[in-house]
Image: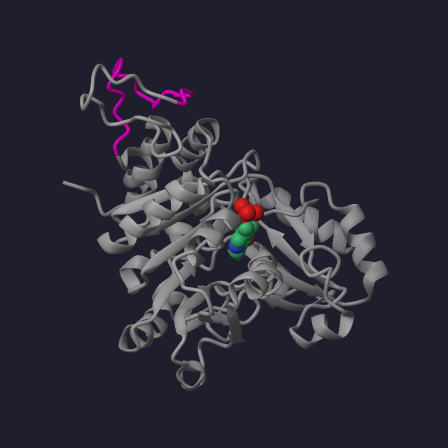
Amino acid sequence: MKSKHISTLAVHGGHQQDAGHNALFSPIYTASSFIQPNLHEGGEFAYSRVSNPTRHAYETALADLEQGCYATATASGMAATALAIELLPHGSHIIAMKGVYGGTYRLFERLRKQNNQLSVDYIDLNDLDQVKQSIRPETKMIWIETPTNPLLELVDIEAVCQLAKQHDLLTCVDNTFASAWNQTPLTLGADIVMLSTSKYIGGHSDLIGGALITNRDDLAKELDFIKTTVGAIASPFDAYLALRGMKTLALRMERQCSNALEVARFLESHPKVADVHYPGLESHPQHALCKKQMRSGGAVVTVRLKGDVETTKHFIGKLQYFVLAESLGGVESMLNHSASMSHGSMTPEEREAIGVYDTTLRLSVGIEDIQDLLADLESALR
Ligand SMILES: *Cc1c(COP(=O)(O)O)cnc(C)c1O
């Protein structure tokens, strides 16, 4: 019987048994090919682009973690997104959450628009009337990202997926920020989950990877065909690292999300802070949705300091534990200056229109002792 509890699934999910030597942890099979004793006598694995034992152990564990029936592990999160939209015919239309991840926007607008005639509307998916009005004959998919980066707006996954089903549209949820510990979109009606495993699944800032997970047999078949055809698979080394990271997902998330709530509360009450965005705070406009859909407010906190870019630079320079870095989701606390990093290609006016200022910082809260993290922020603010 399969557990419903994520702490158990993270450790025991999937088919991790090593058929060779009963190793407790799945070995790294680097082989490109597997010997077939004779014609029509092949085993489970033949060629590693199609299937590989290490990747299989990881993929089946990921599928269980996200409550799906199938997962495919890709070379990066972006490779997973590219694979998902390979499902759509030329000239398709997607309705996407406004403020999707920058790389997703670049893929849609600067590549698929040109070579696949893809068109995308970016709207607030919580406005269901606007979603309905945006549906055209060529609309094929709703692309959900929740919480969004960096302002941590939420989308009601269940409501949007219900609407999508009525109009026969696929739904794909980028579940990178929340991770399966906080929410499992497939159980809320989504067709596909997309993950950048570079973040919370890996959890140690030591790999780049992605995945798609589904609970639909027809989509599993199609995705597996596209994966084999396009070939942007995770290597056995990365599959091993990600599986190893995944084992402690629940432990890490528990600590990181509770640290994040304390950090958010501390910052909200600090006189040098203008705003705090964190769905786990009662003051967040979508706190009720957070409580309905997520286990916690997540481990990312976005803050807007009072002052200007120089004050912000000074603050960053004084921090000891929060390091300035592009990514998020590792065990170490990090911060990202959205205006110059993730949203650096936008003009200041475009950024301010979506609420990203020169003094906006996205904190990815790690597993360190909360007293040390609060003291670090307190002294840098001072
Ligand atoms: C990082 C990230 C991606 C892209 O993943 P890579 O592993 O960097 O390719 C996509 N979506 C979100 C929300 C991300 O944070």
Q: Residue at x 75, y 56 (%)?
A: 381
Question: Does 374 appear in magenta?
Answer: no
User: Would you place residue 312 above or below residue 201 in this image?
Assistant: below
Which residue occupies the foreground of this view, 74 or 303? 74
Question: Where, by quadrant of the figure, is residue 165 drawn?
Answer: bottom left
Question: Does 17 appear in magenta?
Answer: yes
Q: Residue at x 24, y 55 (%)?
A: 218
Question: In the rendering, at what x and y percent does residue 330 appear?
Answer: 55, 41
User: Would you place residue 139 above or below residue 37 in this image?
Assistant: below
Which residue occupies the foreground of this view, 212 or 250? 212
Question: Where, by quadrant of the figure, is residue 162 drawn?
Answer: bottom left
Magenta: predominant secondary structure element?
A: loop
Q: Is residue 194 left or right of residue 331?
A: left
User: Magenta segment range?
Assistant: 15-32
Q: Is residue 189 left or right of residue 153?
A: left
Question: Where, by quadrant of the figure, is residue 141 drawn?
Answer: bottom left
Which residue occupies the foreground of this view, 153 or 213? 213
The quarter of the rendered structure image containing the N terminus is top left
Colour basis: one colour
Question: In the rendering, at what x and y percent does residue 363 appear?
Answer: 62, 53
Q: Is residue 216 visible?
A: no
Q: Residue at x 81, y 67 (%)?
A: 307
Q: Is residue 307 left or right of residue 32?
A: right
Q: Is residue 102 visible?
A: yes
Q: Is residue 341 left or right of residue 69?
A: right
- Disc tally is 0
